[in-house]
Image (cartoon, rainbow, N blue to C red):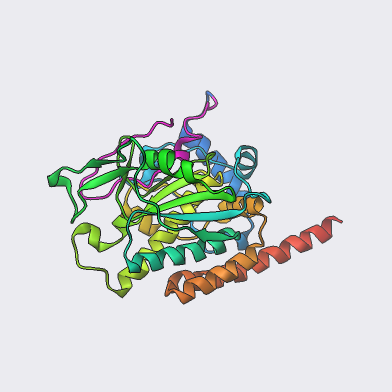
Amino acid sequence: MIRRVSIVLPIVLISLSAHAASQLRNPNLPNDKTHDEWVDEAKQKLYSSIAPDDEKGFLRLGPPKPGEWLQFYKETPQTFERYKLAVKVRPSPERKTLVLQPLGEMDASKQKVMEKMREYAEIFFQIPARLEKPLPLEAPNAILFKPVPINNRHGSYDKQYDGDKIMELVLEKHIPKDAIAYLGITMEDLFSDDLNFVFGIATLKKRVGVYSLCRYYPEFWGQSPAPANSEVLGLRRACKVLNHETGHMFGLTHCVFYHCSMNGSNTLTETDAAPIHFCPLCQRKLAWNMGFDTLKQYEQLEAFYRRNDLIEEADWMVERIKNWKQVVEQEKLKKIGEE
């Protein structure tokens, strides 16, 4: 079990967490360096290795602001070399499908979101994705939830479900044989250990994760059903938690180099401020693991964003495609020069 810290902040929300979050925290550092000095050295080494065209459109991560994830969690930088040594989950002929598992009740609008998440997962990770029939949030001889005190309730939500128990007692018991990752998705609120809520949690080795979408929509807060623009915001948030937590399942730890979808997040505000895309390093890790063509993935993502009114993301991807083509061309010229 990985140690977590519960941080109570006024008004703001608490923690996008994953079992992967602390896997490489608190390393045995050289005696003559602080953690911050060691991280800064790793950052400078990485930045010097990234081609200028590859870095265009990305912001380097600076010191955390008060209340942000990195103020409280001392993350260890995961280099590409460290990732290749540590990753446990990779596609195989027997296991190459992302399986999305609805958990509990969902209305028609959220079922549509689930189908869009399936489509997004298939594009982002470039492997087949399947949507299963819903499973009830229950397990034999176990209680998966705790009641929420009246003064702490939001809208009609009077209980929270234990994400760790859901993974152990529901998802691990039903994981399909062809699933490289089995992703439980629910409209119920989640908690984990001493964290008072989580958007999602996932494991690095067991190929399961569970995500909650309820806090992404105004119904959770006792407000009126979401208008069209809130539905777009809800989809954007759902796609972020999907690629972030599934990224953990494929061995990526939190990114400390760039503003990136793999950044840790302590609040919904921090989550909204993070981009939906992976930075150059996290993208390289994922492409190496999954063995996909990055240009093909980018072009399909641009089309998905455009179809679903994620215009800012679509426009960003157009520029990213231009820059990526330059990166590919420069790498070809470099190889020719080395021959």
Question: Nearest the camera: 1 or 284?
Answer: 1
18 in magenta: yes
User: Which range of residues does the magenta coloring cover?
Assistant: 1-30
What residue sits 43% from the left and 42% below the top? 167
Indicate yes or no whether the magenta region holds residue 269: no
Please indicate whether residue 278 sits to the left or right of residue 150 in the image.
right
- State whether residue 304 is above or below residue 8: below
Residue 314, position as x, y percentages in the image: 49, 72
Residue found 31% across the figure and 65% down from its top: 107
Which residue ends up furthest to the top in the rendered image?
Answer: 31
Where's the C terminus, which quadrant? bottom right
Q: Of all residues shown, which one is farthest toward the left?
A: 151
Nearer to us in this view, 71 or 213: 213
| 102 in relation to 252, above or below | below
Q: Quadrant of the N terminus?
A: top left
Q: In the shown orientation, is residue 45 left or right of residue 211?
A: right
Residue 315, given in percent of the width and then of the height, sits at 49, 73
Asked where in the image residue 165 lies, by quadrant, the reply is top left
Nearer to me, 60 or 261: 261
